[in-house]
């Protein structure tokens, strides 16, 4: 067998990272109910050549991260990919990329409803292409099969925490355009998703999500807003909020400096019949004094429908990560 040349060795790269996140929750109406815990630890790795690669991230915590998780250790992401002229073709455990990413510490209303921070098994295509000298067009399309009870979802709101339901299939697509003007950028995007949920009791649920968002940056400042419209069939008035027709809104603002980030996020999810609404205000500060350390202070003010509990909490986070 011929010896591997230095050029061939240089074409293969690998990265490794690990970290741990600690958190504390302090209810402002009763500080005695404060709680501190290990949020999760993780290890992540990637290996890549000029055409092929693989990414992996495993997380774990004490007990279960959510009551519906099947254990204390879970696969957050794990997939192989090949680079093609249309973009990366990925197969395995993939992140969802339908709407804007949730950058809060405690998780926003979209994550609580399973719209973000909800990886799944499937296949995807992710690509981008330069338009003119500086602009860029990017696209993501994915197909997901059965779910695996891993999500940031709040227990009882959507699919992952429902023991009597399973995802049959889900297809989603997102297209984004970047308009670059030096320190000023515009990123409009549109997206569409179609999913089917099979239930042991009652009719199956079919959902269509459509929406758009816009991100604007000016130097260290950025702002984003978006909307999602869901049309669902097969659900009854007593079903989970995630199974029913609804509307969602998102607005964020962020000021990022070398060691400090100030941000504010507002998200809301409301059923069209007015029987359920879930809104979350989240102002926060992130401090990164050194390379391996990140500290977060975030205030969570959660408003929900009449008769449901509200939350006013201070969330403290401390993340140690290498590298």
Image (spheres, rainbow, N blue to C red):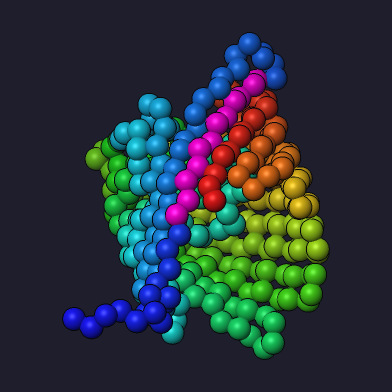
Toward the left, the furthest residue is 1
* The magenta segment: 16-27
The quarter holding residue 286 reads: top right
Residue 212 relative to residue 202: left or right: right
Residue lying at 65% horizontally and 57% vertically, measured from the top left: 226
Residue lying at 35% horizontally and 47% vertically, measured from the top left: 75
Q: Quadrant of the N terminus?
A: bottom left
The quarter holding residue 45 reads: bottom left
> Could you tell me residue 220's position as x and y percent?
79, 58
Asked if residue 208 can be seen in this view, the reply is no
Residue lying at 61% horizontally and 83% vertically, measured from the top left: 130
Residue 307 relative to residue 159: left or right: right
> Could you tell me residue 113's position as x and y percent?
50, 43
What is the chief secondary structure element of the magenta stretch? strand
Q: Is residue 162 above or below residue 196?
A: above
Count of numbered tags:
0
The quarter holding residue 185 reads: bottom right
Q: Is residue 273 magenta?
A: no
Asked if residue 172 can be seen in this view, the reply is yes
Q: Is residue 133 above or below residue 252?
A: below
Q: Is residue 79 above or below residue 105?
A: below
Nearer to me, 15 or 94: 15
Nearer to me, 172 or 228: 172
> Could you tell me residue 161's position as x and y percent?
38, 36
Residue 225 relative to residue 207: left or right: right
> Could you tell me residue 102's position as x and y percent?
59, 49
Toward the bottom, the furthest residue is 132
């Amino acid at each position: 067998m011929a010896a591997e040349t230095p050029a061939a060795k240089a074409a293969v790269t690998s990265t490794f990272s690990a970290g741990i996140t600690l958190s504390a929750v302090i209810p402002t109406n009763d500080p005695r109910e404060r709680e501190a815990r290990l949020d999760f630890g993780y290890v992540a790795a990637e290996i890549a050549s000029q055409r092929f690669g693989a990414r992996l991230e495993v997380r774990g915590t004490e007990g279960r991260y959510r009551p519906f998780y099947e254990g204390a250790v879970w696969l957050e992401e794990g997939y192989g990919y090949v680079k093609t002229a249309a973009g990366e073709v990925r197969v395995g455990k993939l992140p969802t990329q339908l709407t804007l990413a949730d950058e809060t510490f405690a998780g926003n209303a979209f994550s609580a409803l399973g719209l973000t921070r909800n990886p799944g098994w499937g296949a995807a295509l992710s690509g981008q292409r330069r338009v003119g000298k500086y602009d860029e067009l990017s696209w993501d399309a994915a197909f997901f099969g059965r779910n695996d009870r891993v999500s940031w979802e709040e227990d009882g709101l959507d699919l992952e925490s429902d023991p009597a339901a399973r995802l049959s299939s889900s297809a989603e697509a997102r297209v984004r355009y970047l308009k670059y003007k030096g320190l000023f950028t515009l990123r409009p995007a549109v997206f569409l998703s179609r999913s089917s949920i099979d239930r042991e009791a009652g009719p199956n649920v079919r959902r269509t999500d459509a929406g758009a968002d816009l991100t604007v940056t000016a130097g260290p400042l950025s702002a984003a807003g978006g909307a999602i419209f869901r049309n669902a069939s097969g659900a009854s008035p007593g079903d989970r909020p995630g199974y029913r027709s609804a509307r969602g809104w998102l607005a964020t603002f962020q000021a990022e400096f070398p060691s400090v980030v100030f941000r504010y996020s507002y998200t809301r999810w409301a059923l069209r019949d007015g029987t359920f609404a879930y809104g979350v205000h989240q102002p926060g500060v992130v401090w990164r004094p050194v390379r391996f350390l990140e500290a977060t202070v975030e205030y969570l003010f959660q408003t929900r429908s009449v008769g449901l509990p509200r939350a006013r909490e201070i969330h403290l986070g401390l993340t140690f990560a290498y590298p």
